[in-house]
Amino acid sequence: MSDLPKRIRIHEEGPREGFQIEPGPIATEDKVRFCEALAETGLTEVQCVSFVDPRRVPGMADAVDVAQAIQQKPGVHYTAIALNLKGYERAVQTPLHITGGLQMSASNTFSIHNTNKDNAETLVEQRRQLGFFRERGIPVDSAIVMTAFGCNFEGAIAPETVRDCVAALLELADAFGITLERVRLADTVGWASPLQVQRVVGAVRERWPDLPLSLHLHDTRGTGLANALVALQMGIADFDSSCAGLGGCPFAGHKGAAGNICTEDLVFMAHEMGIETGIDLDALIECARMIETIVGHPLPGKVMHGGSLTRYRTPVAAGAAA
Amino acid sequence: MSDLPKRIRIHEEGPREGFQIEPGPIATEDKVRFCEALAETGLTEVQCVSFVDPRRVPGMADAVDVAQAIQQKPGVHYTAIALNLKGYERAVQTPLHITGGLQMSASNTFSIHNTNKDNAETLVEQRRQLGFFRERGIPVDSAIVMTAFGCNFEGAIAPETVRDCVAALLELADAFGITLERVRLADTVGWASPLQVQRVVGAVRERWPDLPLSLHLHDTRGTGLANALVALQMGIADFDSSCAGLGGCPFAGHKGAAGNICTEDLVFMAHEMGIETGIDLDALIECARMIETIVGHPLPGKVMHGGSLTRYRTPVAAGAAA
């Protein structure tokens, strides 16, 4: 495991994932409390809300209120997503850390179903958005390739297809004088296996050995942390994840079937492997338990239920084991 | 991933794990139906029941009835466990495939808490049991080292300690002229991380390169399949697992916190990596859904909720992705 990174960076997406999908109404003050607690764990990036049409996503109707109420801790980026220019207009009026991003799907069919635009049209739209970001002074720091590991419409995705998407996005960034801090490869619909992660990351790495890659993994089919492990073995040091495993399909959410990989489980695995995260695992577990109480049903995170190993690792116990 | 095995063998423990832990009463006929359905998936080993004191484990009160009612499919081993000679006396009167096993805990303290015997006393007891097995013609085919990756009493377990346990068990087997088909390393209390698996398996492998090792992993802290992945990368080809992730702590079971690794999730991962299991994943998913209906609450398996990828992999879809 010699390519393991010494330290990883985690972009916490639990609040945004959870608030948009949980059936319940969640009180604005609970949302704020959760975001603030996450920022106390050592996480440096917390995605709080999405600026979307509240008729489509009722749980985000109070996005501006949440954004304004959070007492920000210095050194922490409180992020958000917006899906279109109208969303960005709302987002930039809040105190959140709003950045622009480039995006593309490795599956043309997914793109058409999702946005009504094929990949060529998506690139045209991206240019228009980049113009808007420049005009408004919104920094652009990342790009994402969606359905990078498989697609419910197109099936398996060839690693070369992902590589071509990255090339297109890098070219676009270059045309606008943008240096990307990270390029995310997203397992949007939960197809990734360890082998597929190895192939796709390998294909991109081979072409751009120094490009900072980030993985956005879902745990739809149970392989989430195994996929993350392979990525760690390849030196990937940047992950999106979700406290308590919040998120996923609104209809299967209570079964914990399809959310992002769980932040505290990822942190547990990293720490056990000697990889630093800068995060206090026990404090993060408390956040997971807090949000489980708030949403009122079991969430899929494991270490939040199994507990950390901290309490067993007293000096006396360690001596007894030797 | 060049050391990946071409094929793995899975010992299904879901029925035994589930029936002993589920709060519910489960009808004998449902237990039988579940065991029979599992045997139709291609699984060749199904652990059906445990012969334990029904006052301590009420869910196993009908163990003999279940064992006798199962319509056995040729080529499938229907196994069971017994914890003492009294249990073995009951077990051998059923049509199940009863084998004896050697066991030891890598944690002396765990052993004392669990069985009231330290490791030296455990070895004496094992000799007594081996005499009984020989007398009754019960074949002995495996050994297990419990708490091989960590212990709630002793904390971290040194890989050398596990190696010493394996040495003691092999010596004992040798004294009785027994060749072990497999030696199980068990993460009894859910401490394993990928790094710890690598270290412990590495220590045992270094000493006995050709000894067939098997892993018994729990998913207490979310790293279950990642631990299995590292084992696969080291060529381990034999795993215990539990359909739907049945099992775990009776008090946290409904949260899916502490069961064995989930069989169909393991099978999914293996197949996606080109590793054969001989198991029909979709049939196994149906078994998982059957038992979820029987127990009446969500079970922790992921692919049973997310679904397999079979339906997306039509020739047309594959063509579109190329």
Image: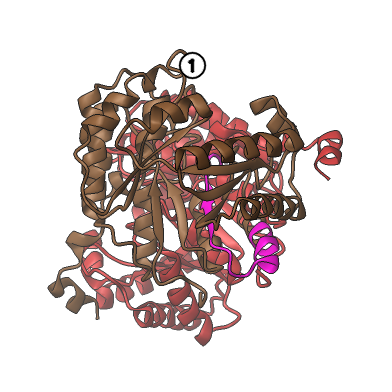
Chain colours: A red, B brown
Q: Is residue A119 above or below residue B219?
A: below
* Nearer to us in this view, B170 or B258: B170
* Nearer to us in this view, B284 or A106: B284
* Nearer to us in this view, B116 or B227: B116
Q: Position of residue A302 (x, y in %)?
A: 51, 39
Disc 1 target residue:
B56
Q: Position of residue A137 (x, y in %)?
A: 53, 63
B203 magenta-colored: yes
Instruction: Farthest residue to the front: give it.
Output: B135
Q: Is residue A116 above or below residue B18?
A: below
Q: Amino acid at mark 1?
A: Arg
In the image, is B289 to the left or to the right of A214?
A: left
Is residue A50 in view from this perspective? yes
In the image, is B285 to the left or to the right of B15?
A: left
Determine the image quadrant of residue B163.
bottom right
Q: Residue drawn 63% across and 38% down? A: B126
Q: Is residue A91 above or below residue B179?
A: above
* Nearer to us in this view, B40 or A117: B40
Chain of the residue that carries numbered disc 1 in the rendered image:
B
Rendered-image quadrant of the C terminus of chain B: bottom left
